[in-house]
Amino acid sequence: MSSASPYRLTPADRVERAGARVLGRLSPRAARRLAGRPVILDGQTLDPQIQLVLKLGERRGLGGWEAQGAEGARRQVRRSALVTARPLPRVAAVADLTVPGPAGPLPARRYIPPPGPALAPGEDGAGPALVFFHGGGFVFGDLDSHDELCRMLCFHAQVTVIAIDYRLAPEDPFPAAVDDASAAFAWVHANAASLGIDPDRIAVGGDSAGGNLSAVVCQLARAASAPTPAFQLLIYPKTTHEPTRSGELFARGFFLVEEDIAWFQASYAAADADPRAYPAATSDLSGLPPAYVVTAGFDPLRDEGEAYAARLAAAGVPTVARRHPGLIHGFASMTAVSQASHDAVVELAGALRMGLA
């Protein structure tokens, strides 16, 4: 399981946190002046605050995830989540819980939205919910690394969010994460009444690996004629092991590099064409839940996410594909240092809200 002892900030970390908050408050003009010559590629201009983040990371000599190994990467992600955390929106309540999984209890966390212009309640006053699966290449990420994103989704979408801490590779390779994700959604649906949510308005969503799992959960539920999510929020999802043009264009220099992608795939499912590992391998996408597919312009995974969205739409699935041209993979965890990333997360939360209205 990905749970680990919490990371505690050092004095140096606190200095870096202060710097991150200064970066996040820069005006567009100041950010451009500090970032230097604009990065233009494939007809897109990199957001200057993101360009600064990449430049600072390069100067600090930060290597790829593979070089750190699984445990090192997990520790670094927990550290980064704390260092870059912004003042968080207030949700009504946050509580840790466990969800039954196929290999034992799964840590989970429930976020309840604050009083506000709530979506129309269902029976017994129950509201909509999102079952959230974090990203991290199936190798790292946990409840803490994505706590800020879950709070933002809860607050801005006005939905209950239940985040799931699924098993990670390489200790637990495919299909462990898929089995956990499917079991978690099924449990939330079966226990909707006790959780105070409407069983007919439960979405699945996640970023990167979490977007992959969300798409797979929808496909498996359809195939089993089981309760199906009402909506799928796919944030720069990993959908295929096949090469793409964006994978070549943005292979290095934009946070997620080709060596790390290869490491993630080798750790999790290699080049397995099983659609439970890579949802684009499924030939028939008809009958799946409505989808909002978010991509970033400078992301190696951009084209595969957009291709999956196009196939969903062609299969008759109500689908919106939204590209944020100036952003990079992982932007949903960069809201403290990039105003464009913050705005993109607020926007996708709005799409979630509309999808569950």
Image: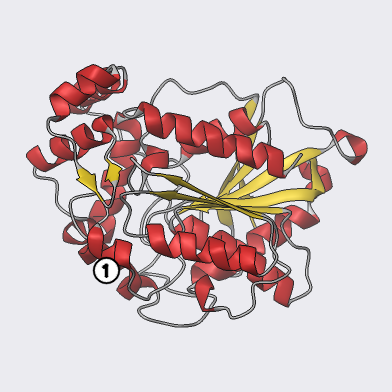
Label 1 neighbourhood size at 10 Å, few (<14), some (14-19), many (20+)? some
Q: Among all residues in the image, which is located at the extreme right? A: 123
Q: Nearer the viewer, residue 234 or 326?
A: 326
The residue at 30%/49% (across/down) is 298
Q: Position of residue 302 (x, y in %)?
A: 39, 57
Please tell me in which quadrant of the rendered image residue 20 appears. top left
User: From what the image shows, is residue 114 above or below residue 127?
Assistant: above
The residue at 69%/62% (across/down) is 317
Q: Is residue 171 left or right of residue 177?
A: left
Q: Nearer the viewer, residue 153 or 243?
A: 243
Q: Position of residue 203 (x, y in %)?
A: 68, 50
Q: How many marks?
A: 1
Q: Nearer the viewer, residue 121 or 346?
A: 346
Q: How is the image coloured?
A: secondary structure
Q: Among all residues in the image, which is located at the extreme front? A: 43
The residue at 32%/73% (across/down) is 243
Tell me the quadrant of the picture where the N terminus can be found. bottom left
The residue at 36%/39% (across/down) is 6
Tell me the quadrant of the picture where the C terminus can be found. top right
Q: Position of residue 190 (x, y in %)?
A: 79, 57
Question: Is residue 287 something one can see in this rendering?
Answer: yes
Residue for badge 1: 263
Q: Is residue 61 left or right of residue 143?
A: left
> What amino acid type should be assigned to the residue bearing mark 1?
Trp
User: From what the image shows, is residue 191 above or below residue 181?
Assistant: above
Q: Position of residue 202 (x, y in %)?
A: 73, 49
Please tell me in which quadrant of the rendered image residue 234 appears. bottom right
Please tell me in which quadrant of the rendered image residue 84 appears. top left
* SS of the residue under disc 1: helix
